[in-house]
Image (spheres, helix red, strand yellow):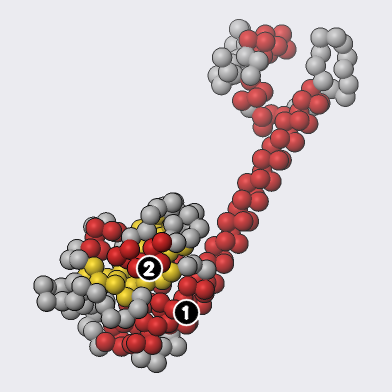
Amino acid sequence: MSGKTTPAAGKDGGELTAEEVATYLRRHPDFLGDHTELLEILTPPSERTGANVHDMQQFMARRLGDEVTRLRGQLGELIDTGRANMTVQSQVHGAVLALLEARSFEHLIYLLTEELAPILDVDAVTICVERVGDEAPNRARTAGVYVLEPHGVDSRIGQGHDVLLANDIPADPDVFGPAAGIVRSQALARLRCGKRAPSGLIAFGARDRNKFQPEQGADLLVFLARALERQIQGWLNLPS
């Protein structure tokens, strides 16, 4: 039984005696382990004073050392996460700036499908649009652009969702085309380019199976998708 319940008073209602404290600790040997914050304020013995007295100083030092190691580990993880976030932020900003260099809609698509991959440190970037009507083409004429079946965006990202991050997956050739053979993790973001435009998505694929993972934040990916939407609306004169 752990020492999570601490007696507040002695038998007579007054302060606890040393004997009562000792009796309580004998009955709850895990008390200090459950209340390690007390180790910072207790005064340890400087050395063993008898055969039955443990060296509390060594015990406290070990406990505090373990706590310092744990905190250092957490700090290291926070630093690594912060650096990774800054790297991704810089990559996304670079991608948006690259798209702003487009001189035409065709040039925008070229930049998107050919130039963004190295900037974002991925292996494939494609754009997909849903087919509207039976007369619409099943395949796009532009490399890196793919036509999906009606409601194909919802079926891949999920109805009501704007982003899907997935790792360790077989890639969809309807989304990644020939690059599907090497893609093992993906990030998909919905594109809403206006009321008159078909639903679409932008897809990022990586051969690293853990490049994209479901628990990762998607704010920067959404920002990139929104920036691309504005670009497409501007070049095609689409009402928002």
- Does residue 169 appear left or right of residue 237 in this picture? right
Does 236 appear above or below 86? Answer: below
User: Residue 69, position in %: x, y?
Assistant: 71, 40
Q: Residues within 10 Å of mark 2 (few under 14, many from 20)?
A: few
Q: Residue at x 67, y 10 (%)?
A: 26
Splitting the image into 4 quarters, where does residue 205 fall? bottom left
Does 68 appear above or below 206? Answer: above
| Distance between mark 1 and mark 2 Cα atoms | 17 Å
**Quadrant where the image shows the N terminus:** top right
Residue type at mark 2 is Pro
Residue 20 appears in the rendering = no
Q: Circle 1 sits in a helix, a strand or a loop, which is it?
A: helix
Q: Which of 54 and 203 lies nearest the eye of the viewer?
A: 203
Q: Nearer the viewer, mark 1 or mark 2?
A: 2
* Residue position marked by numbered label 1 in the rendering: 115
* Residue position marked by numbered label 2 in the rendering: 178
User: Residue 116, position in %: x, y?
Assistant: 46, 76
Splitting the image into 4 quarters, where does residue 107 fall? bottom left
Q: Earlier in the sequence, mark 1 or mark 2?
A: 1
Residue lying furthest left? 134
Q: Which of 169 and 195 lies nearest the eye of the viewer?
A: 169
User: Residue 175, position in %: x, y?
Assistant: 32, 66
Q: Circle 2 sits in a helix, a strand or a loop, which is it?
A: helix
Does 59 appear above or below 128? Answer: above
**Quadrant where the image shows the C terminus:** bottom left
Residue 74 appears in the rendering = yes
Splitting the image into 4 quarters, where does residue 30 fall? top right
